[in-house]
Amino acid sequence: MVGSGFCQMNNTTSPSTSSVSTTTASAPVITKQGGRGFQRATLFVIWAWLIIFALIPNILVIAASFLTRDEDKFLTLPVTMGNYIRLIDPLYLKVFLHSLSMAGMTTIICLLLGYPFSYLVSKADKKWQSLLMLLLVIPFWTNSLVRLYAVKLIMAANGLLSTMLINLELINEPLQILYTQKAVIGGLVYLLFPFMVLPLYAVFVDLRDDYILASKDLGANKLQTFWHVILPLTTPGIISGVLLVLLPAMGMFYVADILGGSRNLLVGNIIKSQFLDARDWPFGAAASVLLTLAMALLIIAYRASSKRIGKTDYNEVA
């Protein structure tokens, strides 16, 4: 009887035990399926966003650049290359070259200031690094247009800069900075300097000290170490900073409008005037495609420099 009772109890408890084990085994399967569903939904949202707000608009701009201007519909057939031929017109070519020169000077100034700044920040203590980078990013909390008007008040003839220098008896007359090329470059440097620092800071943080120590052990001096070790390893950060500064500098039309007047135009001013004033959408689209091609060339240069030092992203240490 004891044996039969034991067998009966064993038969009674076995279904519940099997059900618990089945539930426990199926739980990871459900969790894994839910994780895959969330991943697929996330990828779908990302791809949908890129297709709707990046790919399709760029395709429309490229298509518009080959059409003809129309007074009523803005765009019409036939397909033509005339919009791109107009880009080499001496009038527009002069503006493009002038815009490129100002953007190039802005990029060089940001690089000369941002390179040593990023190096010094990367060598500071961890707590100071966070504070310094926070101070660098804080201006982004304010609209760039508002900050640009503040710069205008500083550069004005009766502004803060001239008033302070006159009170210190360093100058006798107010400085004529506003509505000049210097004012536009100064405004661009002020707005775009953080975009140069951030990628440079990233590569300096990832730069391993043993490379520098090995260079010193092999007899290289500081200049040779910088030229043959530090500079090649930080080249992706330099190109990334140039990519983030050069092209936006050519397109920030409101900087030229506020600080430069009508004599210091950027490519962005031409694009804006063609779309809003002249209503020549095909030519404005062609100018936009030109900037896009310039960005593509810089991205290719960035990828080539990354492969040269044996990595595909400047955040990955070789």
Image (cartoon, rainbow, N blue to C red):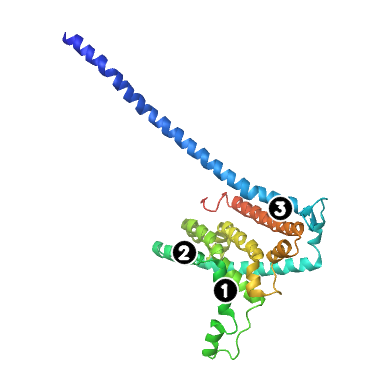
Kindly identify the amino acid type of the residue bearing the numbered disc 3.
Answer: Val
Q: Outermost residue toward the left? A: 2
Among the two numbered marks 3 and 2 on one chain, the one whose residue lies closer to the N terminus: 3
Position above or below: 249 against 292? below
**Image quadrant in which the N terminus is located:** top left
For residue 149, the mark is: 1
Among the two numbered marks 3 and 1 on one chain, the one whose residue lies closer to the N terminus: 3
Q: Is residue 276 left or right of residue 209?
A: right
Q: Nearer the viewer, residue 141 or 191?
A: 141
For residue 61, the mark is: 3
| Tally of numbered discs | 3
Q: Residue 95, image x and y in percent?
A: 74, 68
For residue 164, the mark is: none
Q: Residue 17, image x and y in percent?
A: 29, 22
Residue on which disc 2 sits: 133
Name the residue located 59 percent from the left edge and 70 percent from the top edge: 189
